[in-house]
Image (tube, grey):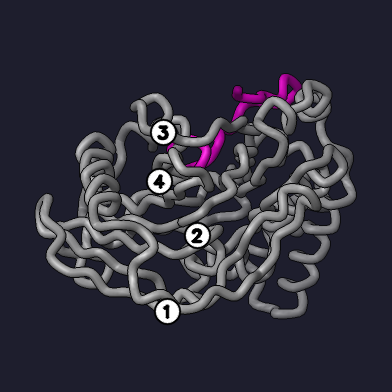
Amino acid sequence: MKILDEHSSSLGFGGKGTSLDWLRSEGFPCPDFDLLDAGNWAELVAGETLSRARTTLSYSEDQLAFSLACHRLQAAVLAAPLPAAVEEWLAGGPIERLGGAVAVRSSALSEDGASTSSAGQYESVLGVHTEAHLRQAIHQVLGSYYGGRAALYRRAREIDDAGHLAMGVVVQAMVDAEVCGIAFSHNPVTGRPGATIEASWGLGPPLVSGEVEPDRFEFDGGECRSVSVGRKESELRLDSVAGVLRDTERPAAEEPCIPTATATEIAASVLEMEDRYGCPVDVEWAIPIGDEAEVVYLQIRPATGAGPSSPVKLLSTY
C-alpha cells in the first residue's frame, strides 16, 4: 500500500522502499509493508526559516551553526503534526493489518544508491505495537534525517540538502526472527564474484552493528567452499507480549545457526537477485521462529563499491 500526500507532489519512496517493492514484484518472499511517500516529510520541513537551516547544513563551515541547524530541523519534525494523508492511513489500523507489530524504517531518497548506501545513518524502530508508538516512531525516523552524524555523512559525500532530497518511511510487518543475516552476491572484502552469507541468532541490529561475530559461509558459484562459526554469545529478541526488545545471553555454539543447505538456498536467491537487479547486491534476511519457517528477505540494496553497474530499474523512481 503506497501512501501519497495529495497536498504536495509525490517525491517517491527512497531506495529502501522502492527496492522492497521490487523484491515483492519479483516474487521473492518478504514481509508485508506500507510505504509513506517522502512528500509527507517535505510538508513537515516547509517554510523559509527551515529552508535557511537546510542551507546551513550544506554550506556552513561553523560547527556551532551546523549543530544548531540540525537541532532546529529535528525539533521541527518531532513537534509537527503528521500530514493529513498519514492520519488517514493511521485510521485504517496498519498495525493490525500488518500482523500486530511493525518495524518502522528510514527510506531516504539519498539512501541505498549504487555509490553511497547511508547504511546505519538513520533510525529504525522495531517492535512497534500501538498507534501511539507508531506515531512516535514515524516522527523519530523522519527526524533522524537531520541527526548530526547523518548530516555530516551527506555533506562529506556532497549530497545537497538544499535540493530536493527527503525521507520516505517503510512500515513493515515485524519478523520475530529465530535467525537473521546478511547476504552479499560478491565477497564484501575482496569484491570478487561469489556469494557470502553471514548469520546469527535473533534480530538483526547486533549483527549489523558488529556487536556479534556471525557464522560465515563463502561460495564459489553454487558450491559452499568454506564455513566459519562465529561467537554468537548474545541475541536480541522481541517480547511479543510486552512489545519490547530484550538482549539475552546465548552460549557460544560449536555449530552454525543455519545448515549449509539453507545458506546454499540463500546464496542461490541472492545471485538471482543480482542478475535481475543489474548490479551486485547486499541483502538482509531472516528466518522467523517456527518449525516450518522459511527464509524471508527484509531489504536489498546495491553493494557499494562491488561493481560498476547501477540498478537502472530503480533510479528512474527517485
The amino acid type of the residue labelled 2 equals Ser
Residue 216 percent location from the top left of the image: 30, 68
The amino acid type of the residue labelled 1 equals Arg
Q: Is mark 3 on a helix, strand or loop?
A: loop
Residue 247 percent location from the top left of the image: 66, 69
Q: Is mark 4 on a helix, strand or loop?
A: strand
User: Which quadrant of the figure has residue 187?
Assistant: bottom left
The amino acid type of the residue labelled 4 equals Ile
| Quadrant (top left, top right, bottom left, bottom right) of the N terminus | top right
Q: Earlier in the sequence, mark 3 or mark 4?
A: 3
Residue 197 percent location from the top left of the image: 30, 59
**Within 10 angstroms of label 3, few (less than 14), some, or many (20 or more) residues?**
some
Residue 298 percent location from the top left of the image: 48, 44
As measured in the structure, the alpha-carbon distance from the residue carrying label 4 to the one carrying label 2 is: 13 Å
- Residue furthest out toward the front: 291
As measured in the structure, the alpha-carbon distance from the residue carrying label 3 to the one carrying label 4 is: 12 Å
**Within 10 angstroms of label 2, few (less than 14), some, or many (20 or more) residues?**
some
Q: Which of marks 3 and 1 is nearer the N terminus?
A: 3
As measured in the structure, the alpha-carbon distance from the residue carrying label 1 to the one carrying label 2 is: 27 Å
- The residue labelled by disc 4 is 300
- The residue labelled by disc 1 is 231
Which dot, 3 or 1, sits closer to the camera?
A: 1
Residue 10 located within the stretch drawn in magenta: yes
- The residue labelled by disc 3 is 29
